Image (spheres, coloured by chain):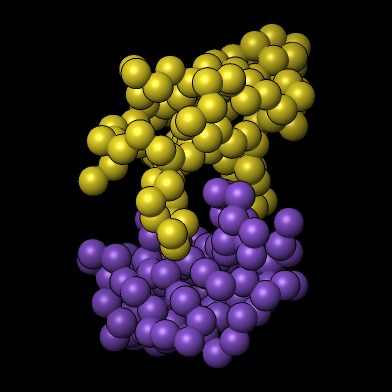
Chain colours: A purple, B yellow
Amino acid sequence: SAVISQKPSRDICQRGTSLTIQCQVDSQVTMMFWYRQQPGQSLTLIATANQGSEATYESGFVIDKFPISRPNLTFSTLTVSNMSPEDSSIYLCSVRQGVDTGELFFGEGSRLTVL
Amino acid sequence: AQTVTQSQPEMSVQEAETVTLSCTYDTSESDYYLFWYKQPPSRQMILVIRQEAYKQQNATENRFSVNFQKAAKSFSLKISDSQLGDAAMYFCAYRSARDSWGKLQFGAGTQVVVTP
């Protein structure tokens, strides 16, 4: 299974600032997904990042707030822009393997706290 | 749109005992995947078990097994011989087989507490 590394693991940010989360995969993958997990809640999909094309955002999420880059088949970034306390969440990167067996594999997540 | 429902916010079980977590889903499709993921305090989402809807046989992985009732749209997880390391949040997830991208939809989660 793919090994996924996320940076930072956690951070404390000030209101109004932006933070970029990095996701590195140890193998080439086509599809990468960014999920948000608010405190005590389930996972909600933010966007799907397909290499070579613009990210596709789910309802309620917009590119200006959560710009995503996908420069190659092993790397992606998610930026949380102009942060407010409501953005305090765990952000998780996940990937689908090259040979699609149905499931997604997840990174350890990035816990952001916005003061 | 598909929805995944986990009606048990928390379940408590004693070591070596068995606990069953419930999950129901709503879909009009006939071909799909169902999953149980475990999220310990470390935050890492770990796949516990996978079920393909076209397979009638219930999936089993060591102490973890599912009861898949397709007509009832029910997908429960049984943890046998519970261990302290099983304590975690458990999420049920759905993926449409028609979704070539492969995104998952998650339920609200069930917190499993294991007592010595």
Residue A63 image position (x, y, % from top left): 31, 82
The image quarter containing residue B72 is: top left
**Residue B4 visible to an observer of this rendering:** yes
The answer to which of A95 and A36 lies nearer the viewer is A95
Q: Which residue lies furthest to the top in this view?
A: B17
Q: Is residue A37 visible?
A: no
Please report the residue visible at 73 percent of the width from the left and 21 percent of the height from the top: B63
In front: A89, or A31?
A31
Quadrant containing the C terminus of chain B in the rendered view: top right
B18 lies left or right of B97? right
Image vertical order of residue A79 relative to residue B76, above or below: below
- x and y percent of residue A86 in the render? 32, 65
- In the rendered picture of this protein, how many numbered marks are placed on residues? 0
For the residue pair A64 and B3, the one nearer the viewer reads as B3
Residue A101 drawn at (x, y percent): 61, 50
Residue B32's place in the image compared with A50, above or below, is above
Where does residue A110 sit, x and y in percent of width and height? Answer: 57, 67
Residue positioned 29% across, 85% down in the render: A64
**Residue lying furthest bottom in this view?**
A71
Which residue is at 45% across, 75% downward? A49
Q: Image quarter for residue A107?
A: bottom right
Is A57 situated left or right of A5 in this image?
left
Q: Which residue is drawn at 72% across and 72% down?
A: A27
**Residue A26 position (above or below residue B86):** below
